[in-house]
Image: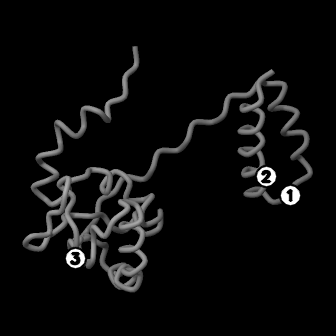
Amino acid sequence: MLERLDRYFDPVAGKALERYGFAYAEMIANWAAIVGDALAAVSTPERVRWPRGGEAQEGRGRGGTLVIAAEAGHAIELQHDSGRIIERINGYYGYEAITALKIRQTRVTRRPPPEPPAAEVSPEAAEALRCHLQTIGDEPLKAALERLGRGVLAGHKP
């Protein structure tokens, strides 16, 4: 029987994350969804510093300063987008959790997202798709259309 592991994450990692100001692990886990893939590739949240008395009801902090580690050369971009980033974080949580950003330039080690598995289609359907695409001369376009076609064909099983 398969079971989701996220329900075990908070009890195991919750205390360690709270030490760095992350009452919710979602900010780390969903950083790319919050700030976008381009900024997530060159930055990562490090900690949240809460003001004295910043703890609100239900353990949710308000008015914190998010410390972000950023690759050298990208800190200025993050600083420029700080208003949008704060707005996206607060929109994600549904309340004014973060009011300021502090950006620290350092090396950020991030793993690239895994490639999605190729869609499984029958050999006949794959050959028919290749026949339809053989007149396209632009190779990157042809490859993109083949991936799209495989996805469409894999989604419509008889």
Marks 2 and 1, the one that precedes in the sequence: 1
Q: Is residue 75 left or right of residue 155?
A: left
Q: Which residue is mark 1?
A: 137
| Amino acid type indicated by mark 3 | Arg
Question: Under tag 1, what secondary structure?
Answer: loop
| Amino acid type indicated by mark 2 | Lys
Circles 1, 3 touching at the beta carbon (< 8 Å): no
| Amino acid type indicated by mark 1 | Gly
116 or 45: which is nearer to us? 45
Circles 2, 1 touching at the beta carbon (< 8 Å): yes
Q: Which residue is mark 2?
A: 142
Marks 1 and 3, the one that precedes in the sequence: 3
Q: Nearer the viewer, mark 3 or mark 2?
A: 3
Question: Under tag 3, what secondary structure?
Answer: strand
| Residue 94 vertical position relative to residue 131 in the rendered view, above or below | below
What residue sits 17% from the left and 42% below the top? Answer: 13
Marks 2 and 1 sit apart, C-alpha to C-alpha, by 7 Å
What residue sits 33% from the left and 65% below the top? Answer: 95
Where residue 10 appears, x then y in whole percent? 22, 40
What residue sits 29% from the left and 59% below the top? Answer: 109
What residue sits 47% from the left and 67% below the top? Answer: 38
21 or 117: which is nearer to us? 21
Q: Is residue 156 left or right of residue 136?
A: left
Q: Which residue is the extreme one toward the top?
A: 1
Q: Which residue is mark 3?
A: 104
Residue 81 occupies quadrant = bottom left
Where residue 110 appears, x then y in whole percent? 34, 57
Few, some or many residues within 10 Å of mark 2 (<14, 14–19, 20+): some
**The C terminus lies in quadrant:** top right
Q: Nearer the viewer, mark 1 or mark 3?
A: 3
